[in-house]
Image (tube, grey):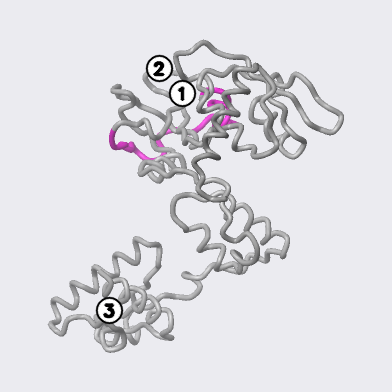
Amino acid sequence: MVDRLERLVNLTATLLDTRRPITLDEIAERIEPSYPDEKVARRRQFERDKETLRELGIPITVDTPDGFGSDQAYRILADDYYLPDLGLSDDELAALHVAITAVRLEGNDAREALRKLGGVTGEGADATFADLPVTPALSQLFEAVNSHAPVTFTYRGESRRLRPYGVVLRWSHWYVVGHDEDRDASRAFRVDRIDDGIRSGKIGSFTPPPGIDPGELVRNDPLTYGEDQPIDARVLVDPPRAAWVVDQLGEDAVVERRGDGAVVVTMKVVNRGAFRTWVVGLLDHAEVLAPPALRDDMIDWLNTLIDRDPRP
């Protein structure tokens, strides 16, 4: 495995460095660890490596050494491999740096792209405020949304057919939202609760309604999952997050606007875990005001987290 990883890295560098397409025999002479001497085994191993690089998003161009003949030759064009100069200012690059390093998806693809743009440097480069979960179904759902393809899956033991309009992150969970063909209504489904593989239908089978906002379909839902009686919560949100919270919950949730720009919002809470996640996501810009039982529950939970933290 280590030898193959080293060979893949060297193969990428070799195909980037060449000014003309090179044949498999030329590649075998230049890279280490080397390919087998036997031609059939060499070709088979190279094809596996080539396919792996393409799956990683590395574009390998296939040509002929001199433009004629049947021999195949290979190279990686720099314009296809490297990110173009986006013309970002220092302030714009710094903002992109904060966005990528403060909230991290599982994996480091965004950080690698930022490095190519000259980011991930300086103080705070490794500071992460939140890790967002990634499930295997996400890529297929994003593809279905982009290609307007219906999807079928099993959700809580029941087969569902959905025209997906978007994939939305709410309360630290991913939701796919769209039109449920069986219910003939808009629905939102938590992605990590999809029971089995997702089956995609024909591309271009539907057109989303004009002006549809997938986020509207999951504005409050996660807080209302559960069997307990709903609690009317009141939360004070500081000015830096006030507009974002109002946009998320809706203007009807605002019960008080303060002179400094802060707002007090109200919401019905059933799922206390989802509520705590939402409050913590606002960092030090939110305070649970009422009811006392919910405020005490939040304080106890935070103290438990502090006690578990081994850092001084």
Left or right position of 241 against 144:
right
Q: Residues within 10 Å of mark 2 (few under 14, many from 20)?
A: few
The span picked out in magenta is 196-221
List the residue tagged with mark 1.
187
Q: In this view, does 253 lie to the left or right of 224?
A: right
Task: Count residues near mark 1 (Cα–Cα under 10 Å), then give few for <14, some for 14-19, many for 20+.
Answer: some
Secondary structure state at the residue bearing disc 3: loop
Residue carrying label 3: 72
Which residue: 57% across, 34% down? 302
| Residue identifier under label 2 | 183
Closest to the observer, 74 or 27: 27
Residue 294: quadrant of the picture: top right
Q: Is 75 placed above or below 57 here?
A: below
- Give the quarter of the image for residue 13: bottom left
**Label 1 amino acid?**
Arg
Dot 1 falls on a residue whose secondary structure is strand
Is residue 210 visible in the rendered image? The answer is: no
Image side of residue 242 versus residue 194, left or right: right
Residue 74 lies, with reference to residue 183, above or below; the image says below
Label 2 SS: loop
Residue depicted at 66% across the width and 61% down the height: 93
The N terminus appears in which quarter of the rendering? bottom left
Point out residue 12 in the picture as x, y percentages from the top left corner.
Answer: 38, 75
Which sits earlier in the primary sequence, circle 3 or circle 1? 3
95 vs 233, nearest the viewer: 233
- The reply to whether the C-beta atoms of the residues labelled 2 and 1 are less than 8 Å apart is yes
Residue placed farthest to the top in the image? 229
Query: In 3D space, how far apart are the residues under numbered discs 2 and 1 (Cα atoms)?
Result: 9 Å
